[in-house]
Image (cartoon, rainbow, N blue to C red):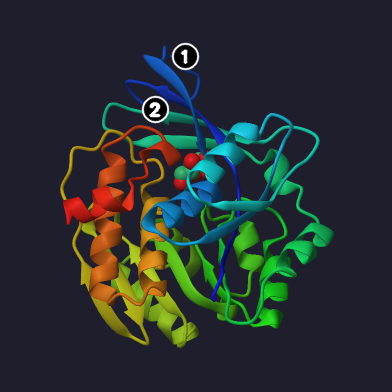
């Protein structure tokens, strides 16, 4: 049976409710503060599991990271490849303003202490044809890509948050690239959605591309053929993890063999539900809720 391995971050998110995002030199009071389990890796594993996929998460937490492992386990994620190491877990400081917009400071912690030995040990459990999902919140991503590609694994990458490390990754080894407009511009230098897609298709003709456009929906592109999905209108409370929810539900749908149209609709409904709820992993809906919305 084809396995899905998500090698990614696990963060504690410290979320502050503010009137507006704090400006340079300014001090503002927060109307509320909550701690949630998050991290793009953890969120995407939980979205996959809640969508119904069987997913292995590989990653590292620090000494105080038990709650994140427990949440993954309770959500149905296989946690055998999550290890606890000395030092602090990854964490974020997130401000959410009255328009549900956020801004995030990321501290890598244990997410940035991956070693070749640990990566090799994890990849031993997988073989040609298995899927590997990656984001950009852990170190050694280029090494993971090269090793997994050599094994014949199918690599799906959400290069988020974009930084100089993404430039070290060989995108020609990707089966599917999942990006938003901002990442699309950072990778291609183009602002317009169709120009982003054309540039990527010209450079990587065999790669499938999912371009999410926030409130404007999403486009999936396979060998130049575009499938367009509009967004669903909801009252947003907190957009954190909306993209991760989309990624998890979309990938589960594709791997189940659903049509592209159905996969896009399902992922759109799941992320629409996620933005109506506070927090990261806590906001990711169960499959039954998504089906009901559809
Ligand atoms: O995508 C949302 C996630 O990004 C948050 O949970 C936070 O941890 C940041 O990594």
Q: Residues within 10 Å of mark 2 (few under 14, many from 20)?
A: some
Across and down, in percent, residue 63 comes to: 74, 31
Q: Is residue 58 above or below residue 198?
A: above
Q: Which mark is residue 291?
A: none
Secondary structure category for the residue under label 1:
loop
Residue at 54% over, 44% down: 72
Residue where numbered disc 1 is placed: 27
Q: CA distance from mark 2 to mark 1?
A: 10 Å
Could you say where residue 86 lies in the image, as x and y percent from the top left?
A: 81, 35
Please give the count of numbered marks on the rendered protein: 2
Instruction: Judge left or right: residue 274 versus residue 81.
Output: left
Question: Based on the displayed image, in which of its 4 quarters is residue 180 positioned?
Answer: bottom left
Label 2 belongs to which residue?
A: 21
- The residue drawn where x is 72% and y is 68% is 123
- Residue 109, image quadrant: top right
| Quarter containing the N terminus | bottom right
Quarter the C terminus occupies = bottom left
Looking at the picture, does residue 271 appear above or below residue 276? Answer: below
Residue 166 seen in this snapshot: yes
Q: Earlier along the polypeptide chain: callout 2 or callout 1?
A: 2
SS under mark 2 = loop
Does residue 77 sit above or below 143 in this rendering?
above
Residue drawn at (41%, 15%) of the image: 30
């Amino acid at each position: 049976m084809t396995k899905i391995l998500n090698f990614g971050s696990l963060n504690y998110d410290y979320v502050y409710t503010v009137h507006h995002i704090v400006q340079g030199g300014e001090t503002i009071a927060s109307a509320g503060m909550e701690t949630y389990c998050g991290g793009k890796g953890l969120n995407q594993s939980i979205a996959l599991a809640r969508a119904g996929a069987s997913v292995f998460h590989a990653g590292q937490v620090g000494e105080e990271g038990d709650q994140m492992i427990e949440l993954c386990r309770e959500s149905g994620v296989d946690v055998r490849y999550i290890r606890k190491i000395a030092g602090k877990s990854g964490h974020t400081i997130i401000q959410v303003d009255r328009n549900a917009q956020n801004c995030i400071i990321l501290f890598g912690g244990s997410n940035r202490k991956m070693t070749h030995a640990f990566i090799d040990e994890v990849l031993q459990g997988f073989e040609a044809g298995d899927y590997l999902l990656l984001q950009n919140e852990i170190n050694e991503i280029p090494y993971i890509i090269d090793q997994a590609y050599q094994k014949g694994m199918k690599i799906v990458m959400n290069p988020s948050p974009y930084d100089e490390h993404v430039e070290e990754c060989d995108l020609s080894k990707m089966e599917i690239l999942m990006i938003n407009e901002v990442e699309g511009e950072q990778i291609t230098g183009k602002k317009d959605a169709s120009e982003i897609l054309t540039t990527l298709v010209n450079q990587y003709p065999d790669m499938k591309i999912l371009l999410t456009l926030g409130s404007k929906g999403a486009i999936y592109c396979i060998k130049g053929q575009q499938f367009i999905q509009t967004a669903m209108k909801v009252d947003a409370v907190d957009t954190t993890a909306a993209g991760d929810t989309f990624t998890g539900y979309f990938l589960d749908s594709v791997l189940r063999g659903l049509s592209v149209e159905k996969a896009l609709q399902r992922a759109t409904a799941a992320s629409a539900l996620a933005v109506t709820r506070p927090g990261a992993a806590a906001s990711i809906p169960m499959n039954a809720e998504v089906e009901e919305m559809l």
